Image (cartoon, grey):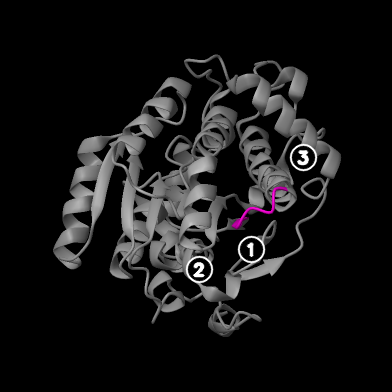
Amino acid sequence: MWGLLKRRGPSGFSPSSTAEEVTAGIDGRGLVAIVTGASHGIGAETCRVLALRGVQVVMGVRNTSSGARVREEIVRQVPTAKIEVLELDLTSMSSVRRFVNNFNALNLPLNILINNAGIAFVPFELSEDGIELHFATNHLGHFLLTDLLLEKTKVTAKQTDIEGRIVIVSSEGYKHAYREGIRFHKINDESGYSRFFAYGQSKLANILHTNELSNNLKEQDAKVVVNSLHPGEVATNIVHHWAFLHGLMSTLGKFILKGVDQGAATVCYLALHPQVAGVTGKYFIDCNAIDPKSPATDKELAKRLWDFSLSLIH
């Protein structure tokens, strides 16, 4: 088993590689990154490693007190770290817009946007905007955030001549969406709701969003790449809504799952590594691009999701 975990792909990295290892020797000074879901798990480790490499980090967090504690710990470990903490609730479109306004008030460029935050396996619930909670949090909130920050990312890339990068954290759970992929006409319908399939639907939406955004950026000849990824099975608190699964991961996770340092590896790789230069619209596992399965490759479905998402945010 350990031999399999150590097996390296074309990138030179393996499932056991850590975020520090995949960014070793990379100088991120002068770059600015936004990381959502930054107060715990993969997001917190991503912020730490980016700060370690000299990147100025803006943490998007739902709980600013938790975010402040993470920031303090990172600064303790990396005294030179430049980190801001801003409130961001991805279930709320008004909160997303407020976050962007607060970020713009910092008068910073934006080189890297990491859409990491997520929820999993929650009972049926609607957001304050009337959107099913998985779809609202994992996809639509990030879709709106990306839409509002895209121009700044493109302008930063053009002015600095440094490629902009957008990183979208998906999951292999995309393979377990509803039969129709995206339930456009029943997105907020409790009948037939499955917390398992709803999570899969939102993760499928992450990949479809990546694909369509990548196509749009290529058409605009923008110097910005966008890629999605599966971080691996990681021992975090994302499944705390499902008591049985959370208990199982808490007791057995440290023996069979990745740690957050390994879970953040592909995120940090896509954010910083020179191997990713010019690579866009791809799906990565363990720092290596793979071909996702249908319907994640369905171009018509991606375009339909894009138009549907635009209709919801406007």
x%, y% of residue 253? 44, 60
Image height check: is 66 above or below 227?
above
Amino acid, disc 1: Phe
Amino acid, disc 3: Ala
Q: CA distance from mark 1 to mark 3?
A: 18 Å
Q: Is residue 221 magenta?
A: yes
Image height check: is 242 above or below 188?
below
**Circle nearer the N terminus (3, 2):** 2
Q: Secondary structure at mark 1?
A: strand
The answer to whether the residues at label 1 and label 2 have Cβ atoms under 8 Å apart is yes
x%, y% of residue 256? 49, 66
Q: Quadrant of the N terminus?
A: bottom right
Question: Which residue was labeled with disc 3?
Answer: 302
Q: Residues within 10 Å of mark 1 (few under 14, many from 20)?
A: many
Q: Nearer the viewer, residue 33 or 72?
A: 33
Q: Nearer the viewer, residue 303 or 218?
A: 218
**Circle nearer the N terminus (1, 2):** 2
Q: CA distance from mark 1 to mark 2?
A: 10 Å
Please state the extent of the stretch shown in magenta in the rendering: 220-226
Q: Is residue 92 magenta?
A: no
Q: Residue at x 37, y 55 (%)?
A: 32
Mark 1 or mark 2, whichever is nearer to me: 2
Q: Tell me the quarter of the picture where residue 308 sits.
A: top right
Q: Residue at x 68, y 68 (%)?
A: 289
Q: Secondary structure at mark 3?
A: helix
Is 274 left or right of 291, judged from the image as shown? left
Checking the image for residue 269, the label placed there is 2
Q: Quadrant of the C terminus?
A: top right
Question: Which residue was labeled with disc 1?
Answer: 284
Is 101 left or right of 297, judged from the image as shown? left
Q: Secondary structure at mark 2?
A: helix
